[in-house]
Image: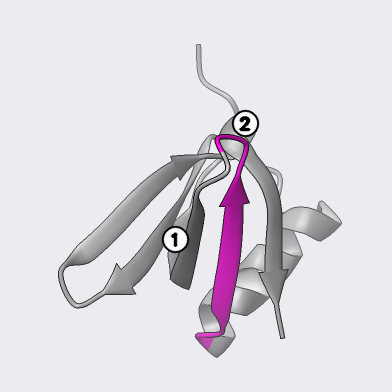
Amino acid sequence: MSQEFTTGLPSARQVQNLIRDKKTVEVKLLTGDLITGRVIWQDPHCICVEAGEQEIHQIWKQGIGFLKYR
């Protein structure tokens, strides 16, 4: 089943701005883990966070507690 990505939603636009501006974010997962890095892409189900030169995290959106940025 294909789910269309709705870029008109405020949350999707905000993440796109974070990608464009290369802002550092903190992603707090429902497991309690904290990942800090840059969001490099998003789709309807996941975001991808680059936390270091060779550390890439593909995170299911349903597992995110919150996303914090400055």
Quick check: 17 left or right of 31?
right
> Relative to residue 6, is residue 33 drawn left or right?
left
Q: In the image, 47: left or right of 26?
A: left
Task: Point out the residue furthest to the top here.
Answer: 1
Mark number, residue 32: none
Q: Position of residue 31 (x, y in %)?
A: 55, 35
Amino acid residing under circle 1: Trp
Q: Amino acid at mark 2?
A: Gln
Q: Position of residue 28 (x, y in %)?
A: 61, 53
Circle 2: is it few (<14), some (14-19), or many (20+) Cα within 10 Å? Answer: few
Check disc 1 and report its element: helix, strand or loop: strand
Query: On screen, 35 above or below 32?
Result: below
Answer whether residue 68 is magenta in the image.
no
Using the image, tell me which numbered label, if any, was put on residue 62.
Answer: 2
Q: Which mark is residue 41?
A: 1
Task: Tell me where residue 25 appears, x and y as whole percent.
Answer: 58, 73
Please name the predominant secondary structure of the magenta segment in the image. strand
